[in-house]
Image (cartoon, rainbow, N blue to C red):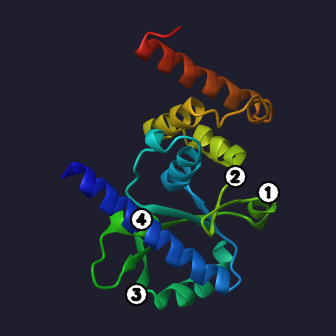
Amino acid sequence: MLFQAYDKHLEQLSAVAERVCRVLREAGIEYRIVGGLAVLFHVESRDPLAARLTKDVDLAVDRADLPRITEAVRSLGLEYRHVAGLDMFVCANAPKTQSGVHLLFVQERFFSEPAVNYAGILLVSAPQLVRMKLISFRQRDKTHIIDMDSVGLITPEIEAGLSKPLRDRLQRVRAEEAQSTGAE
């Protein structure tokens, strides 16, 4: 029963992401999937059994495109909401914030780095995702760093491209993980 719920939720998330990304691509709107779903897709590409489920779709977009995005996703039955400081699209018939598409507004230069195409969905690149997670540095971000590191996504080249404070955070996550697993 638990595995069926996991599979059903993953299918729903993937379907929402695919539909939203398709209409954005058709409208010529730049976007990237970020957050936990991007981590899941990156990790899954290396080791499907190491991927962790996330509860929603996080989408990086340019704020200037919000009116066009709102119009594009309306055909999917999604409506724009600003709730508790979060900008999101929710299903008009069942508006649950955790099942929505959460927006992260970024500047155009964010889109200059190549994206990773995952089944027709543009993901933030692994180097950008690692930087984002190390900057946010919440517990879930640390878990995502551990997951990405465990499947070899954080390469020496990515690590070398981090600023010193972010490299220090990465080392802290690795040390905490080693201590918690007894592997030092």
Residue at 66 percent across and 23 percent down: it is 168
Mark 1 touching mark 4, by CB under 8 A? Answer: no
Q: Mark 3 or mark 2, which is nearer the start of the sequence?
A: 3
Q: CA distance from mark 2 to mark 4?
A: 20 Å
Residue 101 position within the rendered picture, expressed as x and y whole percent measured from the top left: 46, 69
Residue 73 position within the rendered picture, expressed as x and y whole percent measured from the top left: 51, 85
Residue 121 position within the rendered picture, expressed as x and y whole percent measured from the top left: 61, 67
Q: CA distance from mark 1 to mark 4?
A: 25 Å
Disc 4 marks a residue whose amino acid type is Leu
Q: Is residue 178 left or right of residue 6?
A: right
Mark 2 touching mark 4, by CB under 8 A? Answer: no
Element at label 4? helix
Q: Which picture quadrant has residue 154? A: top right
Residue to which mark 4 is pinned: 13
**Is the residue 110 above or below the residue 15 in the image?**
above
Q: Nearer the viewer, mark 1 or mark 4?
A: 4
Residue to which mark 2 is pinned: 125
Q: Which mark is residue 77?
A: 3
Q: Nearer the viewer, mark 3 or mark 4?
A: 4
Mark 3 touching mark 4, by CB under 8 A? Answer: no
Q: Is residue 84 visible?
A: no
Q: Which mark is residue 79?
A: none
Q: CA distance from mark 1 to mark 3?
A: 31 Å
Residue to which mark 1 is pinned: 113
